[in-house]
Image: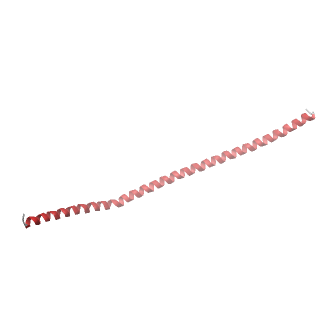
Amino acid sequence: MGENGLNETLIQQILEIEKQAQAIHETAVRDAEQLPIQAEQEAQALIEKARADAQEEARRLVADAQAQDECARIQAQAEEEARRMEALASDHFDRAVGYVLDQVAGRE
C-alpha cells in the first residue's frame, strides 16, 4: 500500500468520523427540539396534579364544614330538647309537690 492508499484510508476514516459527528449532531438537535415540548408536558402534568389536589382538599374542607354544621344543628336540637324536658320536669315537679302537700294536709 503506497502513500496514495494511506491517504485514501485516512480520507475514509475522516469521512466516517464526519458522518458519525453529523449523526451525533442531528440526534442532539432532535433532542434539543424535544426539550421544550417535554418541559411543557411535564408542567401541564404538574398543573393538573395541583388542580386535582386542590379540588380534593376543597371537597374535604366542604365535607368537614358540613359535618361541623350538622354537629352544631344536632347539638342545638339536643339542647332545645333538654330545655323542653327540664321545663316539663319542673312543671311535673311543682304538681307533684302540690299533690304531696295536699295529701299531707288531707285535702284530697
- Taking the spot 66% from the left edge, 46% from the top edge, the residue there is 73
Q: Position of residue 74 (x, y in %)?
A: 66, 45
| Residue 11 figure quarter | bottom left
Residue 2: percent from the left, percent from the top?
6, 65
Colouring scheme applied when the structure was drawn: secondary structure
Q: Is residue 64 above or below residue 106?
A: below
Q: How many marks?
A: 0
Quadrant that contains the N terminus: bottom left
In front: 73, or 28? 28
Can you give x and y, in whole percent of width and height, for residue 24 in the image? 25, 61
- The picture quadrant where one finds residue 82 is top right
Please name the residue shown 19% across and 63% down the image: 17
Identify the residue shown where x is 14% and y is 63%.
12
User: In the rendered view, would you say 105 is above or below 14?
Assistant: above
Considering the image in quadrants, where does the C terminus appear? top right
In terms of depth relative to the viewer, which is nearer, 77 or 12? Answer: 12
Residue 61 shown left or right of residue 74 in the figure: left
Looking at the picture, how far across and down is residue 80, in whole percent?
72, 45
